[in-house]
Each structure stands twice: as C-alpha cells, then as structure tokens.
Image (spheres, grey):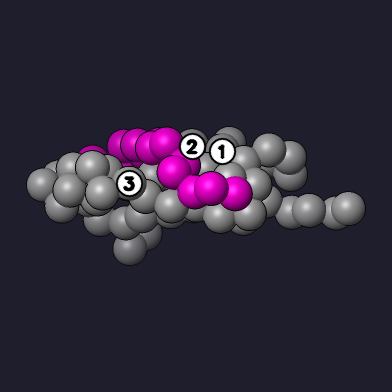
Amino acid sequence: MELNKDTFEKLKSMYSDNGIERGGYILRSGEVVEIENCADEKSDNFTFSCYDLDKMEKSDVIATFHTHINKSS
C-alpha cells in the first residue's frame, strides 16, 4: 500500500510526544478515520472497541493504524 501525500500528512499530524495513543483506520479513498482509544492505559496502549471493529469490517478499510508516543521521562 502506498499512501498519498495528504493521507500521510493527516497521519503525521496525529503524532504527539505527550498524551494518549491515537488510532483508527484508512479507507480506500485515503480518508483517515480516527476512533476512540478504549484502552485502560491510554498513554501506553491503543485498543479498538468491538463496535469499531464491526464498523471497519463493513467499510472499505485498507489499513489500521495507531501512534506510538515517545516517553522521554
């Protein structure tokens, strides 16, 4: 899979060194869909909900993603 520049920039803009892990999925159209992080420890993990997994299964999803925040302390 090759990402176009707009999709890549959307993904890149979601990254942060502070806060919570973020994630979602990418549609064939290139649209980036962010979903809620359901993990107990949102600063260390990203968990998809069953609802979101079901929704992805019924969509034209080509990839999932999540960030890895960099903890420097």
Local packing at callout 1 (Cα closer than 10 Å; few below 14, some 14-19, many 20+) is few
Q: Which residue is mark 3?
A: 49
Q: Which residue is mark 1?
A: 14
Q: Secondary structure at mark 3?
A: loop
**Position in image of residue 39 (x %, y %):** 49, 48
Residue sitting nearer the eye, 30 or 36:
36
Q: Which mark is residue 69?
A: none
The answer to whether residue 59 is left or right of residue 69 is left
**Residue 39, magenta (yes or no):** yes
Alpha-carbon span between mark 3 and mark 1 = 19 Å
Q: Earlier in the sequence, mark 3 or mark 1?
A: 1
Indicate which label's residue lies in the foreground, 3 or 2.
3
The answer to whether residue 55 is left or right of residue 45 is left
**Outermost residue, right direction?**
73
The answer to whether residue 51 is left or right of residue 14 is left
Alpha-carbon span between mark 2 and mark 1 = 7 Å
Based on the displayed image, in which of its 4 quarters is residue 55 positioned?
A: top left
Q: Main secondary structure of the magenta part?
A: loop
**What kind of residue is marked 1?**
Met
Q: Which residues are magenta?
A: 26-41
Residue sitting at 37 percent across and 59 percent down? 2
Local packing at callout 3 (Cα closer than 10 Å; few below 14, some 14-19, many 20+) is some
Q: Which residue is mark 2?
A: 10
**What kind of residue is marked 2?**
Lys
**Position in image of residue 57 (x %, y %):** 15, 52
Q: Secondary structure at mark 1?
A: loop
- Circles 2, 1 touching at the beta carbon (< 8 Å): yes
**What kind of residue is marked 3?**
Ser
Residue sitting at 17 percent across and 48 percent down? 54
The answer to whether residue 59 is left or right of residue 41 is left
Q: Earlier in the sequence, mark 3 or mark 2?
A: 2
